[in-house]
Image (cartoon, rainbow, N blue to C red):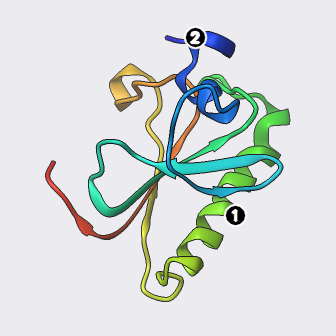
Amino acid sequence: MTTAGADCLFCRIVARRSDAEIEYEDDHVLAFKDIYPKAAIHLLIVPKRHIASILTMETGDAEVIGRCLLAARTIGAAKGFGERGYRVSVNCGPEGGQHVYHVHFHFMAGGRRGA
């Protein structure tokens, strides 16, 4: 499990200390291309503030988590999938497939790529 700051890959991306192809940004949320895409469009949507996992989030985190989902809606519309649809998923904990311990939503559209 990684922590906030220098040890967290997504915190480094938010701080622009690690490279990523950024597709969306607002005051609270950042979205960038997944380096191992599972769909024609596969973005990771992250809160700029470090939250390790849905499993550990607190009541006060609800607003920024909601903002991540609103960002997904905005991205979907901007990419032409607002009417057609897309997938948004989140992995929680080791048995849920979470590998980076900074909450992130997978936004996928345009058909699946390899498993």
Label at residue 7:
2
| Kind of residue at badge 1 | Leu
Give residue 105's position: percent from left, percent from top: 52, 47
Q: Earlier in the sequence, mark 2 or mark 1?
A: 2
In what element is the residue under mark 2?
helix
Q: Is residue 54 visible?
A: no
How much space separates mark 2 and mark 1, taking CA atoms?
28 Å
Point 38% across, 20% down: residue: 94
Q: Measured along the vertical axis of the image, is residue 82 above or below residue 87?
A: below
Point 67% across, 35% down: residue: 14
Q: Is residue 75 visible?
A: yes
Q: How many marks?
A: 2
Give residue 67's position: percent from left, percent from top: 74, 55
- Report the mark closest to the observer, 2 or 1: 2
Give residue 1's position: percent from left, percent from top: 49, 11
Residue occupying the far bottom of the picture:
83
Q: Measured along the vertical axis of the image, is residue 51 above or below residue 28?
A: above
81 and 23: which is toward the camera: 23
Q: In the rendered view, does 21 fall on the left or right side of 73?
A: left
Q: In the rendered view, does 1 fall on the left or right side of 15?
A: left
Label at residue 53:
none
| Kind of residue at badge 2 | Asp
Q: Measured along the vertical axis of the image, is residue 66 above or below residue 36?
A: below
Give residue 37's position: percent from left, percent from top: 30, 50
Residue occupying the far left of the picture:
114
For mark 1, what is the residue? 70
Could you say which quadrant of the image residue 74 lies in? Answer: bottom right
